[in-house]
Amino acid sequence: MRYDHHTLPNGLTIVGEYHPTAQSVAIGFFTRTGARDETPEISGVSHFLEHMMFKGSERVSGEQIDLEFDSMGARYNAFTSEEATVYYGAVLPEFQTRLIDLLAELLRPALRQEDFDTEKQVILEEIAMYKDRPHYMVYQLARQTYHQGHPLGNSVLGSTESISALTRDQMLAYFQRRYVPNNMVVALTGRYNWEAALQTITERCGAWQPGDAQRDLTPPQPTPLERMVADPRRDRVYLCAVAPAPAAQSDARYAAEVLAKAIGGGEGSRLYWALVHPGIAESAAMQYSEEDGAGAFYTFVTCDPSQFAQVLDLLRTTLVQAQTDGLSEDELARARRKLASGLVLRAETPMGRLTSVGFDWLYRRRIEPLNESVDRLLGVARPDVAALLADRPFATLTLVALGRLEAAA
């Protein structure tokens, strides 16, 4: 393995994890902008803009972009989160230059008014579609409630109202402010040609003008809250509990991963034995979400309305007991092995490593080699998890439920 790093004069950072025996190359443009960087007036613009990138530039149409990706046999896509927007593709090594060319072209969109008007309807349909997905809705409600106005509680999709009111000029201003080279990282993984990549990226992106794309890193101030949203259309109750956790920049993030896996990591976890195995809940899971300057534990439970009161009581009891008594070495060992196995399996292809490499640099300004990540996960000990629990994260639990709550009562 070899690790590469270069920064262009305009601030665009290029990083790479070279694997000489890989059979492909994956490349991603990671832009440090997402829902948390939006104001209420332009809520959802980051995700909308992601769609608009595929509508073409002044030189290349959207249809030509799709055909070019297909002609390379590329696996490609994009995604928007609360914190970043990523455009990526994976190809055979001989198509490296063409992929960089195409991704760079993608990131200089024309933003034509007619495309904007058409795609706005697609976004509004997507918002309507997700309103019919209770797991998504309870997650959004939980983020909003937990963060209490903090930008991390912003919706990635935005609302019907914000998208309907959004103008093409507002999107253009956002693009010009946030999509600047010093707010972006180009990550390469697999069997790439580093010198050729630098030449292509310099030629295609070296003239992009830098700008001021600051981010508000004020940490959220969570307090215990409950929010119950009755929805008689549902035949289940969907519960999301949120608690504070270490930030993406904290070394305690490894202990947080192990803690979440031990408590709610599927079969064999505490929530599985407390809720799923006895048939009290249909599903129960906890995940650790690392974020820029913050972090949170998210616990999701689905149950029959008649079981909701019992589920709520057992969930609280399980979390408090873990916080008070700690976790056993056997529980932690199983969690460590699950996490390490998952990390290694994902890393078997360059595409599987790409997001880790890109977000490592966005969050921590270094690439953490796979073996180091695995060693740090496997090295998490009971005192590390106990130190997290000593801060009593589940004492500030935010609880949000969505569904047939009248039946639960």
Image (spheres, rainbow, N blue to C red):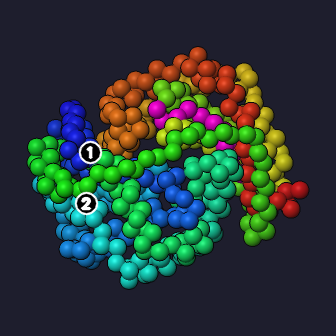
* Circle 1 crowding by C-alpha within 10 Å: few under 14, some 14–19, many from 20: some
Residue at coordinates 76% horizontally, 40% vertically from top-left?
A: 224
Where does the image place residue 255, in percent across and percent down from the top left?
A: 54, 27
Which corner quadrant of the image does residue 78 belong to? Answer: bottom left
Where does the image place residue 101, in percent across and percent down from the top left?
A: 18, 60
Q: Quadrant of the image for the N terminus? A: top left
Whether residue 151 is visible, yes or no, is: yes
Where does the image place residue 317, in percent across and percent down from the top left?
A: 78, 34
Earlier-in-chain disc, 2 versus 1: 1
Whether residue 299 is visible, yes or no, is: no
Q: Nearer the viewer, residue 385 or 5?
A: 5
121 sits to left or right of 388: left
Residue at coordinates 52% horizontally, 34% vertically from top-left?
A: 247
Q: Let me know if residue 247 is in the magenta part.
A: yes
Mark 2 residue element: helix
Q: Residue furthest top?
A: 383
Q: Let me know if residue 219 is in the magenta part.
A: no
Q: Nearer the viewer, residue 147 or 261?
A: 147
267 sits to left or right of 368: right
Q: Residue furthest right?
A: 409
Q: Please give the residue where the numbered disc 2 appears in the rendered image.
A: 103
Tell which tag, 2 or 1, sits nearer the viewer. 1
* Circle 2 crowding by C-alpha within 10 Å: few under 14, some 14–19, many from 20: many
Identify residue type, mark 2: Leu
Residue at coordinates 72% horizontally, 21% vertically from top-left?
A: 325
Q: Please give the residue where the numbered disc 1 appears in the rendered image.
A: 11
Identify residue type, mark 1: Gly
Q: Provide the residue span drawn in magenta.
A: 239-249
97 sits to left or right of 390: left
304 sits to left or right of 113: right
